[in-house]
Amino acid sequence: MSKGALIMQVKTQLALLGGPKTVQSDPGNIFTWPIITEEDEQAVLEVLRRGAMSGTDVTMQFEKEFAEWQGTRYALGMNNGTAAIQSAMFACGVGVGDEVICPSLTYWASALPCFSLGATVVFAEVDPTTICLDPKDIKHRITSRTKAIVVVHYLGHPADMDPIMEIAKRHGLKVIEDVSHAQGGLYKGRKLGTIGDVGAMSLMSGKSLAIGEAGMLVTDDTEIYERAEAFGLYERYTGEIKTESLREFAGLPLGGYKYRMHQMSAAVGRVQLKHYDERCEEIRRAMNYFWDLLEDVPGIRAHRPAKDSGSNMAGWYAAHGLYVPEELGGLSVTRFTEAVRAEGAPASPGCNIPLHLHPLLNTCDVYGAGKPTRIANSDRDLRQPKGSLPVTESITKHTYHIPWFKQYKPEIIEEYAQAFKKVAENYTELLADDPGNPPNIGGWHFFRHTT
C-alpha cells in the first residue's frame, strides 16, 4: 500500500459492522521490545557465573556510563523507579508537613512516595495538548509548605520546563523530573532529567529503556546525590561522603531502605544503553511516519512536540493520540477505539485515571495517624474532590492508545494508519449504537502497553 493509496477516500464497510479488516499483514517483530541479543545474554551470564548478582561493580560501571550518556555529573542505580523518585524527594529535603506539587494524571509512583516521608501532594492541572503539568496552574498551588515540584514527562511528551523552572527559582523550590516515560528525550535540545534539580526514572521491562526491574537517579548536585545515596544505599554511604551533615550517620541507611540495583539488570542496562539512541531513532522515524499519514484526518491528533521545537518523544513509550469527538459527531472514544480494534489495529481508550479521585488520596489512613494520610501532617484539608481539576478529569475521554512501532517498516505502518483513517472517515455508521464512555476509562496503575 502506498501513501497515495492511503490518502484516498475509504468506502469499505467497517469491520465492526461486517466489512473486511484493514490490517491483513503479519507485523512480524515490529512490536517486539526490548530487543534482547546474545550480547545481553552473555552480560547476564557473566554476572551469574561469578555470583555477583548482589554486588555493585557492574552497577557502578553502568552508573558511570549512564551519567556520561545523560550528561550529568552523577547517576545512581536503584532497584526500581519508585525508589528513585522517593530518594529524589528525600534528597530534595521533602519531609514531615511538606507539600509537593505533581500532576494527578500520572502513574502513582510520581506522587505517593511523599507519604512515607510524612509529606503530602497537591495536584495541579495538565495542559490538554501536552498532557503534562500546566505551568499556568502551578503558581496558586504554592504555599509556605511547598518544597518541590514533580514534573512528569507523561507518555514521553516533554513538559514545558522553562516556565516551570522560572516559577521554581522564584519561589525557592526544587524540581524533580520524572523521566520514566521519556528516557533520552529532549526539551528544546536539552536532555530530559538534566533541566531540574534531579531526575528520576524507571528502567523496568516495557519502558523505552528497558533493562529488567531497575531505576536511575541523575543530578549535578553533590548534596542531592549523597542524600539519595545515604537514604537507601547503605554500602555506598561511607565516611568519604562530602556533605558534612551526613557524615555522622554513615554506615546505615537513613531511610531504612535497601535500594541497590540488581546487577543482572545493570548488566543488561550497559548493553541496552550502547544501542539505545540508534534504536530510538528508528522508533521515532516509524512513529512520526504513522502520524504524518494521519495528519489531516478529522477527530484525531498526534501527541508529539512540534517538528521544529528541538523537542522529541525519546522512545515514544506508551504511545497515545488526542481525540476530538466534536469532529466526529460526538462519537465516544470508547466506540471509536472498538472499531479500530475490529480493523486489526491495537487501540484502547483513555490513559491513567486521575489520582486525586482515588480513595487512597481521600480517606485512607495508611499509617494509623487517626486521619487520612493525605492530610495527616497538613495545616488544612487540601484534598481535591471530583470537579476540582476539570481539565485533568476530561483527558481520559480525549486520549487513546495507538500502536507502538519499534521498527520502520512503511508498508506495515501504513496498514495500521489506514485502520484509524477508515474508522474516522466512516464514523457516522457508529453513532447509532454508541454506548458512550463508561465513568472510568483507563486504569489507576499504568498497564503494560507493548504494541
Image: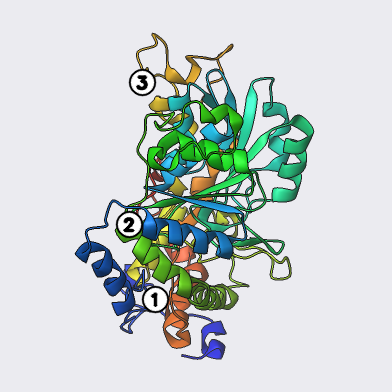
Could you tell whether 108 is left or right of 314 in the image?
A: left
In the rendered structure, which disc, 2 or 1, sits on the residue that comes first in sequence? Answer: 1
Disc 1 secondary structure class = loop
Dot 2 surroundings within 10 Å: few (below 14), some, or many (20 or more)? many
Dot 3 surroundings within 10 Å: few (below 14), some, or many (20 or more)? some
Q: Judge by depth and name the residue closer to the eye, 283 or 367.
A: 367
Disc 2 secondary structure class = helix
Question: In the rendering, at what x and y percent does residue 5 appear?
Answer: 52, 89
Q: Judge by depth and name the residue closer to the eye, 253 or 367.
A: 253
The residue that disc 3 covers is 366
Could you tell whether 381 is left or right of 172 in the image?
A: left
Q: Residue furthest top?
A: 370
Q: Judge by depth and name the residue closer to the eye, 189 or 254.
A: 254
Measure the alpha-carbon separation of dots 3 and 1: 53 Å
Q: Quadrant of the C terminus?
A: bottom left
Give the residue displayed 72% in from the left and 28% down from the top: 140
The residue that disc 1 covers is 13
Give the residue displayed 73% in from the left and 65% down from the top: 309
Give residue 360's quadrant in the image: top left
The residue that disc 2 covers is 263
Camera-near label (2 vs 3) is 2
Camera-near label (3 vs 1) is 3
Camera-near label (2 vs 1) is 2
Eyeballing the image, is 81 above or below 141?
A: below
Give residue 382's quadrant in the image: top right
The amino acid sitting under disc 1 is: Gln
CB atoms of marks 2 and 3 within 8 Å: no
In the rendered structure, which disc, 3 or 1, sits on the residue that comes first in sequence? Answer: 1
The amino acid sitting under disc 3 is: Val
